[in-house]
Image: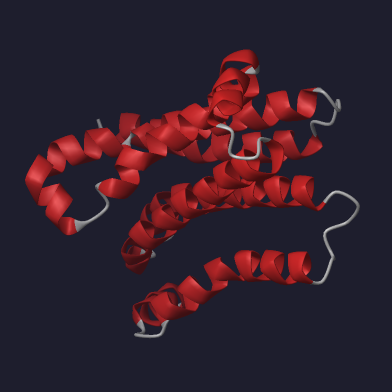
Amino acid sequence: MQTARLNTWLRHRLGKPMWFLLALLPLMWLIYAASFDHLGANPAEALIRATGDWTLRMLCIVLAITPLRVGAGLQSLAGYRRMVGLFVYFYAILHLLSYAWFDMGFDVVDIGNDIVKRPFILVGFSAALLLTPLALTSFNRAIKFIGAKRWQQLHRLVYIVAVLAILHFFWMRAGKNNFVEVGVYAAVLACLLGWRLVHRFRVA
């Protein structure tokens, strides 16, 4: 009964607009905090870190949709997957732009050297790069153009993105020897990816 109610609520015409606004709240808060000097002693670092954190959170949410849809019977969640996936890319690009602007001053040569020199930057840049074809092919016309089977194979790149994102976060925190948050995100993503592996073998 509760599942049926949740599915009905998710199908409500206001469901997606409400999710859209909720997903924009972190950005709205960051704009407000930056405008009124609420980002602490190092605003640039705070913006870079916050956009990275929200990229990881959105990634966890999008990867949780299928387990919830299949395991909890929330079939209506399938209609939210595209929007959430695009928000993953949105916050990833904000994270990349924050780094390029605040850390590197949009100096292309310095950015290139930094990517080559620092492994965690290379891994993070690679993750953002892999997200790009997923965002570009997230529309119905793209699915028809490349075919459903190849589209599904392409979008499995999100699993590689998840691994690269955690590695990026781990290396970034290694300098400060602070791995608590890394461990939490790693555990969540390991559970979500592990569920898929187990489910695939059960179906086979």
Q: Nearer the viewer, residue 64 or 86?
A: 86
For the question of whether residue 132 can be seen, the reply is: yes
Residue at x-position 36% and y-position 84%: 12
Q: Quadrant of residue 166?
A: top right
Residue at x-position 67% and y-position 32%: 169
For the question of whether residue 147 can be seen, the reply is: no
| In this rendering, position of residue 189 left or right of residue 102 | left
Give the colouring mode of the picture: secondary structure
Say which quadrant the N terminus sits in: bottom left
Q: Residue 178's spot in the image, x, y percent?
A: 84, 31
Asked if 159 appears above or below 29 in the picture, the reply is above
Residue at x-position 53% and y-position 28%: 164
Q: Nearer the viewer, residue 11 or 139?
A: 139
In this view, which residue lies farthest toward the top?
Answer: 117
Say which quadrant the C terminus sits in: top left
Residue at x-position 78% and y-position 23%: 174
| In this rendering, position of residue 92 left or right of residue 101 | left
Count of picture labels: 0
Q: Residue 46's spot in the image, x, y percent?
A: 77, 50
Asked if 143 appears above or below 171 in the picture, the reply is below
Q: Quadrant of residue 140?
A: bottom left
Q: Quadrant of residue 36?
A: bottom right
Q: Residue 101's spot in the image, x, y percent?
A: 63, 44
Q: Nearer the viewer, residue 175 or 99?
A: 99
Asked if 126 appears above or below 188 in the picture, the reply is above
Asked if 25 appears above or below 145 in the picture, the reply is below
Q: Residue 125's spot in the image, x, y percent?
A: 52, 30
